[in-house]
Image (spheres, rainbow, N blue to C red):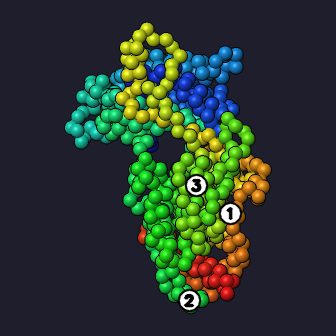
Amino acid sequence: MQNLMKIISGLFFFFFFSVNNLLALDCEYFKNFINYVEKNHYNGLENKVENLTLGFKLLVNKVDEYRLFFSPQQVKTWTDSILNEDSPDILNQSCVVVEELIEALPDVEEKTRTQFKKLVDRFSSGKDVASYYKLLSKRFEKVGDIEENWVLFKEYIMLGGWNALLEKIDSEKLSYEELKTQSEIVFNELFCKNTHHVPGWFFDSYLKDFLLLIDPHTGFIVEYNSKDSSENNSSNTTSVIDQQDPMEVTGVIHSGVDALSGKKYNVGVLRIKHFTYSKNEKDRTSFKVREALSVLNDSVDSLVVDLRDNSGGDKIEVLQIINYFLKTPTTVMLQKTHWDKDVELVGTLEEDLGEKVYNGLFNKPMVVLINDKTISSAEVFAASMQDLGRAIIVGGLSFGKGVGQQYIDLSFDKIEFKQNFNSQEEEKEYRKKYSFDVKKAVLVVTAFKTFRLSGKSIQNFGVSPDIEIPMSNFQNSDREEDARVKFENETVDPLDPSKYTRYSIVDDNISDVRTRFDIRKKDNDSNLVSLSRFVNFDKISGMYFWKESDEEKIADTILKVAVSIASDYVDTTCNKDK
């Protein structure tokens, strides 16, 4: 219980830490913000009233999670006001309610301070506090007591914090009476440890969490001009600048003698961690992949494209890279947006990408390795290779994110406000007041959904491998379908096969490759045996203990299995050519 009270006292700190920032709330910006979401989101705001009501409750929970400042009845009154269906403008009404909450904050803070001082003055020793707190603890074991007796509930929470503070008496050589007479200092210790103003709390915290009520991928990104601002609010701040990873794309060659066939193999492994666009062409993923393929192409017989743990990225980059493995540009997927319910074709032609395309950089057999952390654009790559018959997909079921995001600049200098300013100087001051020294403010809104050529959505379903490689229990994680807020499963009409180019190489060889994989399992292939040991960990937990180093072993072993499949793929292809 003491640990809980320490957490609660920290929440008091958070409240007072945030009050000044909330005072900077601007309803005009808020309404613009919500309108942008409604206009651009794939689903619009189908439940606008519900979302705004949940958003208000979220705000209350942030500033008064344990209802120490606003009574449950007051919160209910405000919430009912937002829910009022007779309100001509739900956005205006929501803003009015939030402004009322903000205006009430200074008064409730002072009342809480007074109540705390009176409460402390009632006791003559720390033992009295502990004894009374113990009695209160029993009274508030039932949740209903919070609603029934809010005043006593506040005492319960405050004494919990005070009780935790009493532990410091001996270490700081202060007597109980000394602490008691310095109730103002004690109050600040419990509730106001730091009142330093952090710019943009409303944006970084409230708006970001509000958007999560809509879907897990819609969000708000803020970048500050001030270094201090970023550091002080680091938990809520995300840079909009892509961080370059020097190991984002790697290419290596695996050579050896296959234990099953006895033949030599040279398999390239192209590892792609993310699909990144940059104004500098050499920093783009597509350029790095092009460079890697120029080395691998003449040195290998087949290729494994490793997309495990690839978090996705830029759609144009993915489409450009898909081209590298196709002899000619073609349609690779379908797309539907909120503002245009008609399905549109997404292709890899130069006019589709708006830049020069490179086709046929690698025309040999290829395998794509995926897992449950292969996400979004990485799934588009895998699905396209599978739908076009260009690659065998191996590994595990992918994450299942088949929605894409649009980035909208909502920095104050980009927003058109409805209110009239008396002068340009007045408008400039207004923008400066509410911009919180923000360098960049970007709304990331889910704007479209992708569909495979078959008409099936990647969303929730993911990409299923042609050959499943056993995955360790330790690698299983939540998928898109497990999200609290999710998009409905949806399909569209399949694309006429005459409108895209499908290759025959996978269809001609997949049966033989699967047969060889089954033989490897029966012959106790060493890599598959190792994977089986990890997968069946629960059954042999008495014999085997998990080590952090095993995660790398599992990943490496899975890659070796994928390489063996690529080797078999080449062998079956060569046999058919003879």
Question: Between marks 3 and 1, how big is the CA–CA gap?
Answer: 13 Å
What amino acid does circle 1 point to? Leu
Q: Residues within 10 Å of mark 2 (few under 14, many from 20)?
A: few
What amino acid does circle 2 point to? Lys
Residue at position x 70%, y 37% in the image: 340
- SS for tag 3? helix
Q: Is residue 144 visible?
A: no
Mark 3 sits on what residue? 319
Residue at position x 53%, y 63% in the image: 308
Sequence order check, earlier mark of 1 and 2: 2
Query: Which mark is nearer the camera, 2 or 3?
Result: 3
- Decide which of 143, 39 is in the foreground and name it: 39
Counting from the top left corner in percent of width and height, residue 33 is at 54, 28
- SS for tag 2? loop
Q: Residue furthest left?
A: 173
Question: Between marks 2 and 3, how big is the CA–CA gap?
Answer: 35 Å
- Decide which of 285, 30 is in the foreground and name it: 285
Residue at position x 53%, y 87% in the image: 264
Counting from the top left corner in percent of width and height, residue 392 is at 64, 70
Counting from the top left corner in percent of width and height, residue 345 is at 69, 49
Mark 1 sits on what residue? 388
Q: Which mark is residue 254?
A: none
Q: Is residue 529 above or below residue 318?
A: below
Sequence order check, earlier mark of 3 and 1: 3
Q: Residue furthest bottom?
A: 262
